[in-house]
Amino acid sequence: MRWILFIIAYIFFVVYGYQAIKTLTKNRWFYFAFIVIGFVVVGNFLFQFVGASSGRVLSPPKNQAFGLLLAFMSFGLVLVPILFSEDIVRFMAGLYHKFSPSKRNFHVPSRRKFVSQMALGLAAIPFSSLLYGMYKGKYNFRVLSYKLYFDDLPAAFDGYRITQLSDIHSGSFDDREKIEYAVDLVNQQKSDAIFFTGDLVNNRSSEMIPWMDVFGKLKAKDGKYAVLGNHDYGDYVDWDTEEDKQNNLEELKQIQKDIGFDLLLNDSRFIEKDGERIALVGVENWGRGQFIKAGDLKKAAEKIDKNDFKILMSHDPSHWEDVVIDDDYKYQLTLSGHTHGMQFGIEIPGWVKWSPIKWRYKYWAGIYKEMDQYINVNRGFGFLGYPGRVGIWPEITVIELKKGKILPN
């Protein structure tokens, strides 16, 4: 039933788009081309998501089909309300004059050209933005740098630099040159350690195999550390057996090892320098709602001391909000990802920071501080679903740890 309603709504959008274009030009090829493109887009979407046998598995063709449909629908969502409002005015005017004794020969006014021009102009903004996000924005990598001050940071680590990556989603990549550029950009930061906070793949471990040689080039003198994200467990695939699913997870863990990452599964490590140390703590995924809750903070912290300076890696920022902040151990810095910043929003430093994802996650992008504890929510390296980014660009985070007084909110 939902597919029937979707098709009806989509036809509604196409019809109004056809009317707007026809009002502006007498060249029938323009509006017939619009109709053909519209139905090719929806046909491809239905083929990928309804007719395909891969179920919920997200692949580049599915992402592309969804992205094109989203762009086309955004065009209609702006166009239709404007033209439909005009139709109501036209209908009411026609109805009034039909029953007016003095104007029985009145004809309903035709669609006005300037209204169609305005509607098409406004509709072109989200349409072109989404297309730009698909073909340019998704690889518009940005390095975001922060200095964070901690009064309990060991003196030997004053000025220590870490790079955080998150949400690689290798199963969505379609441009090797761009990914190689991004990996080189990470290495150019010359950080002391690299932290990856989960979602290496979309669905299957095999998605990462073509990219192992690229990500294997990541370098940091004190090592590369990782945790798992919700997509790494294979929960979005209809496996034939539970054994197949477990084998996929084990293969993913081996891939992490082969590209040089130390995978922390509810475990910890120490980085030592000049007789002092900081603790690295990594939990498995813990997410609010339906997401897997394999993360065990107590288990992960068994080998560390309460007074250690701690960096926690936890994929989902809801874990920080629901569990970490109030834990007896003080986790001075938590690194998360997961939200992608919804891959869509508006960010102008010092002025505005907005995305629809803020209605779901209180902590959704960037640095936050609560109870003298920081979290950085990385906007993600890759993309998923919509194969692009608009306003919320792919992120490489560089954090410099500084010893000093924690600044107030």
Image (cartoon, rainbow, N blue to C red):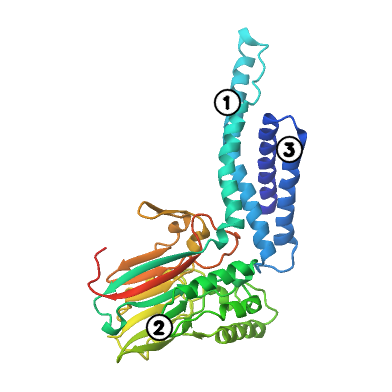
Question: Depth check: 242 or 382 in front?
Answer: 382
Mark 1 nearby-residue class (10 Å; few <14, some 14–19, many ≥20): some
In front: mark 2 or mark 1? 2
Q: Amino acid at mark 1?
A: Val
| Image point (31%, 71%), residue name | 148
Reading the image, the residue beneath label 2 is 281
Q: Amino acid at mark 2?
A: Val
Reading the image, the residue beneath label 1 is 89
CA distance for labels 2 and 3:
59 Å
Tell whether 242 sits left or right of 314.
Answer: right
Can residue 166 be seen in the rendering of this structure?
A: no
Q: Secondary structure at mark 1?
A: helix
Marks 3 and 1, the one that precedes in the sequence: 3
Q: Position of residue 122 (x, y in %)?
A: 56, 39
Marks 2 and 1, the one that precedes in the sequence: 1
CA distance for labels 2 and 1:
63 Å
Q: Secondary structure at mark 3?
A: helix
Position above or below: 277 against 121: below
Q: Amino acid at mark 3?
A: Phe
| Image point (61%, 80%), residue name | 213
Determine contact: label 2, label 3, CB under 8 Å. no
| Image point (74%, 53%), residue name | 43
Marks 2 and 3, the one that precedes in the sequence: 3
Disc number for residue 72: none
In front: mark 2 or mark 3? 3
Tell whether 161 sits left or right of 229.
Answer: left
Reading the image, the residue beneath label 3 is 30
* Count of numbered badges drawn on the protein: 3
Q: Among all residues in the image, which is located at the extreme front? A: 188
CA distance for labels 3 and 1:
27 Å
Q: Position of residue 173 (x, y in %)?
A: 62, 68
Mark 3 nearby-residue class (10 Å; few <14, some 14–19, many ≥20): few
